[in-house]
Amino acid sequence: MSAYEEAEDRPDKPDNRTWKQTAPIMVATMLWGAAGGWVFSLAGIPLAWMIGAMMFTASLAVFGVRLKGPGKSRAVMITVLGVMLGSAFTPDIVGQAGSWIVSIVVLLIFVVVVTAILTWGFQKFAKMPKREALLAATPGGFGEMILIAESYGIDVRSISLIHATRVMFTVMLIPFYFRIFEGYTPPAVSPMGSINDMGVTDALVLVACAASGYFGAKKLGIPAAALMGPMFISAIVHFMGWTQAKPPGELVNLAQIVIGTNVGCRFVGVERRQLINPVGIGIIGAGITLGLAMGAASILHQLTQLDYHALWISFAPGGLAEMTLISLAMHIDTAFVSTHHIVRILFIVMSISVVTRVLFGKPDHDSN
């Protein structure tokens, strides 16, 4: 298991409860998430199943309700997204990939600039130590930041809350922006189709993409294996024309519930008084990054004529799975968006360990 995946499911305190003890709590948590998604879908909110699940479970967690995150089922649901994203890599889309080079290079520069600005701001105004400020400011690599924080003896809870808030705020704000300012309304019928319309052969092909992609990427130690492995295999299968099927809307909605519930459960065990500083820092950091992303997208759009909305979502500081779900829900070029976020995550994961060692020296102890 890679460091990225390991940290995704690793709590701050060990959970020594048995499966029989945790299973009922996990089921109840998922039902709360589903209830939140259903309420938000009735309200016509974009990305309702993920945002509703996230808001319901986060609120319950803060008020002390016993919750348990989706655990390994999260990886299963993310493989569904990986297959879905891979299905977008048609020959026509791949032919456009050469025009993405400029925006990808600008994205990498953007990550470095944003990290430097936020690190400076967190040190100056939030009075955070330099190491903690850097790990809190980096726009991505949630799991990697936690592992590095542990290795340097930094307050893991504070870092995790700041990043959880960053993801939550970003995921909430973008769909509401589209609803209020762009007039977006969710379609009455899912563009992904229904599970009832899928043939057995197509279903087996998609399952094979998910399983082979996940286990292959996991064995190779690729970050976010559950998303990137299935996406890679699915992209090959769809590019070669072996199937045109996509995961059905019911599964994608279930994936939204699981992912939203996972984000909400990051607030489990946090007292309300402990939320003020990390949540405030997370919101301010995400707001600044989103604003800078909007500016960068506007400039790039003028220079390259690439779609402004796709650029903005590609530069936004949300989670890899969450932002690709947004692109699916908004009917924005998923291949473009997912490629940019994968590059962002890989760049951060590969560079942050080197940067921290150069700036702060060898870690105090091994985080594994």
Image (tube, rainbow, N blue to C red):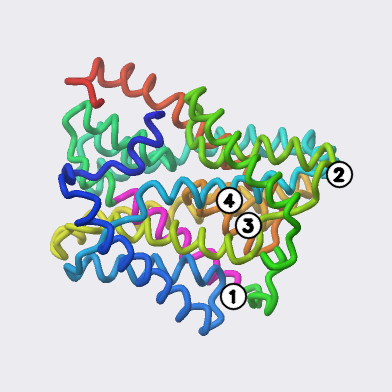
Q: Earlier in the sequence, mark 3 or mark 4?
A: 4
Q: Give the range drawn in magenta.
A: 162-179
* Residue occupied by mark 3: 327
Question: Which is in the foreground here, disc 1 or disc 3?
Answer: 3
The secondary element bearing badge 4 is classed as helix
Picture quadrant of residue 308: bottom right
Circle 1/circle 3 CB separation < 8 Å? no
Few, some or many C-alpha atoms within 10 Å of disc 4 (few <14, some 14-19, many ≥20)? many
User: Is 368 left or right of 303, judged from the image as shown?
Assistant: left
* Residue 336 in sight in this render: no
Circle 3/circle 4 CB separation < 8 Å? no
Picture quadrant of residue 16: top left
Q: Which of marks 1 and 4 is nearer the N terminus?
A: 4
* Residue occupied by mark 2: 92
* Residue occupied by mark 1: 179
Question: Which is in the foreground here, disc 4 or disc 2?
Answer: 4
Q: Which of marks 1 and 3 is nearer the N terminus?
A: 1
Q: Is residue 110 magenta?
A: no
The three-letter code of the residue at mark 1 reads: Arg
The three-letter code of the residue at mark 4 reads: Val
Residue 5 drawn above or below residue 261: above
